[in-house]
Amino acid sequence: MKKFASITVALGLMASIAATASAAEVTGTTTDSTTVTGSTYTNTFETIITPSDISPATPQIVLTEKIAFHFSIGSMIPAGWLSAQTLDTTGEVITDSWGNEWRQVYTWLGKAWVMVPVAANVITP
C-alpha cells in the first residue's frame, strides 16, 4: 500500500510540474520565419543509419499445410506445430543426408528448424 501511495504522489508531482512548465510565459520570440532567437534553421542532418547497418532480408517460407518444427535437425520428436502461414527465416539452410532441406525459423519458443515441405514456397529477396 505504501508503494501505491508513493507512486500516486510521484505521478501527481510530475503532472503539476508539467502543468506549470506548459503555462510558463514565453518571451523574446520573433515573427521572422527564418530565425528564432538568433538561430537559423537549415536542412542539414546527421546520417544515423549507414550502409554498413543495412543487412539483406532473409528468405521467407510460405506454408500451405501444417508442419512440425524441431530444436535440432533430424529430430524425430517435434517441439511443436506450425499452421499455414508465412515464416521468417534466419537465413541458415542445411541439407541432411537424405537430401531434405532444413531451414532455421523464428517461433514463439525461439529459433527452431523446419524441414521445408514440397508444397511450401520459399521467397528469396
Image: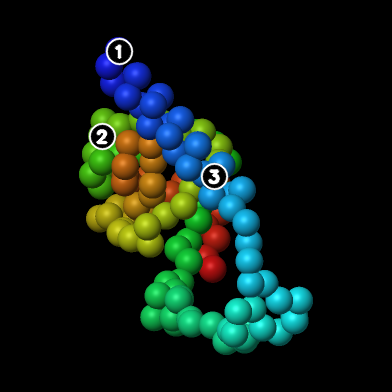
Q: Left or right: where does residue 50 sit relative to residue 3?
A: right
Residue 121 at what x, y percent from top left?
56, 54
The amino acid type of the residue labelled 2 equals Met
The mark found on residue 104 in the picture is: none
Residues under numbered marks 3 and 2 in contact, where contact means CB atoms less than 8 Å apart:
no
Looking at the image, is 22 positioned above or below residue 15? below
Locate residue 63: give its quadrant: top right
Q: Which of 22 and 63 is in front in this view?
A: 22
At 42% from the left edge and 72% from the top edge, which residue is drawn?
A: 55
Q: Mark on residue 20?
A: 3
Answer above or below: position of 69 versus 26: above
The type of residue carrying mark 1 is Met
The first of marks 2 and 1 along the sequence is 1
Q: Where is residue 2 in the image (x, y as percent from the top left)?
A: 27, 16
Residue 76 disc label = 2
Residue at mark 1: 1
Q: In this view, does 116 lie to the left or right of 22?
A: left
Q: How packed is label 2: few (under 14 Cα within 10 Å), some, or many (20 or more)?
A: few
Depth check, mark 2 against mark 1: the one in front is 1
Label 3 sits on what residue type?
A: Thr
Image quadrant holding the N terminus, namely top left
Name the residue: 25% across, 47% down: 73
At a point 40% along the width and 75% down the height, the residue shown is: 53
Q: Which residue is drawn at 43% across and 49% down?
A: 116
Q: In this view, does 61 lie above or below 63?
A: below
The quadrant where residue 80 appears: top left
Q: Crowding at label 3, few (<14), some or many (≥20) Cα neighbours within 10 Å?
A: few
Is residue 60 visible in the rendered image? The answer is: yes
Secondary structure beneath disc 1? loop
